Image: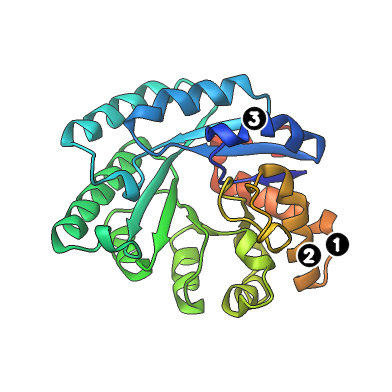
Amino acid sequence: MWIDTHCHLDAPVLAGAADYAAQQGVVWIVIPALEKANFSTVAKLAHQSHNAVYALGIHPMFVPQAEESDLHALHAAVSAALQDPRFVAMGEIGLDFFIPALCTPAMREKQEHFYVEQLKIAREFDLPVLLHVRRSQDLILKYLRRIRVPGGIAHAFNGSFQQAEEFIRLGFKLGFGGAMTFSRALQIRRLAVQLPLGSIVLETDAPDGAPAWLHGLNQPNSPEQLPCIGAALAQLRNMSPSEIAQATAVNAGVVLPRLARLTRLFP
């Protein structure tokens, strides 16, 4: 059983991808929201797909056009979604200091504001968070220490071993995906081997985050690639793919308890 803990299934290019992924053994796909405009989209899609669940949040790359009222809309949407078993987390939220347009002083301040306010919503409703952490690990951690939420996932983790340990200490799992399959991604591959298996979950970040075998083929990543990504992790750790599938699925259920309730595999 494979669980894709981060996939933008609402992207038009992924129409029908959930069914293809199910045929490859992907039993759950977590769809994070990006902005207020697609809150209802991800919720509807999760209900249309037998193997999908969703999260609600405002992505840092969508903060520039976001308004304060969007945070109020998010609060209302989360409050209502608590009655929906397909709703599992807050996300995708976080900080992005890679894109130049997001790194101006004003935009950094706005990003931090939206991140902090969304952490407060997660804390209020006792929800895990799906974190976008790009060149922002230390500041992400700083706020997590101040505003304690019940864990979550540091999506597409690419920090240091010490930063990884701190995320784990705060109750987070670390998401590994296509980047891990590139032989030149030495730091990510070292982490994939050295970190406790109990701290790792798998993801595709589709349609982005393509694994090595799709590189240069001009085709999108998709959740059906997750078993092969998991097999790459199995090879790195000298384990069988089935062992990796079971362990990472259990980890996903631990950190996303609302997801765990949807499957018999978790007590």
Mark 3 vs mark 1: give the one in front. Answer: 1
Say what amino acid the circle numbered 1 marks.
Ser
Residue at 83 percent of width and 58 percent of height: 241
Residue 18 position within the rendered picture, expressed as x and y whole percent measured from the top left: 68, 32
Task: Name the residue type under label 3.
Answer: Leu
Placement of 245 over or under 135, stated as above or below: above
Q: Which of marks 2 and 3 is nearer the N terminus?
A: 2
Instruction: Return the residue nearer the eye: 68 or 101.
Output: 101
Q: Which residue is tagged 1?
A: 240
Asked if labels 2 and 1 touch by Cβ distance under 8 angstroms, the answer is yes
Q: Which of 192 and 106 is in front in this view?
A: 106
Based on the displayed image, in which of its 4 quarters is residue 25 positioned? top right
**Residue 86 sits in which quadrant?**
top right
Mark 3 neighbour class, 10 Å CA radius: few under 14, some 14 to 19, many 20 or more: some
Q: Which residue is drawn at 62% across and 47% down?
A: 220
Tell me if 89 is positioned left or right of 19 in this view.
left
Q: How far apart are marks 1 and 2 (CA)?
A: 6 Å
Q: Distance between the residues labelled 2 and 3?
A: 26 Å
How many other residues sit within 10 Å of disc 2, few (<14), some (14-19) or many (≥20)? Answer: some
Counting from the top left corner in percent of width and height, residue 257 is at: 56, 40
Whole-number angstrom distance, CA of label 3 to CA of label 1: 26 Å
Q: Mark 3 points at which residue?
A: 262
Out of 153 and 133, give the one closest to the viewer: 133
Q: Earlier in the sequence, mark 1 or mark 2?
A: 2
Residue 63 image point, x, y percent: 26, 45
Q: Is residue 90 left or right of residue 261?
A: left
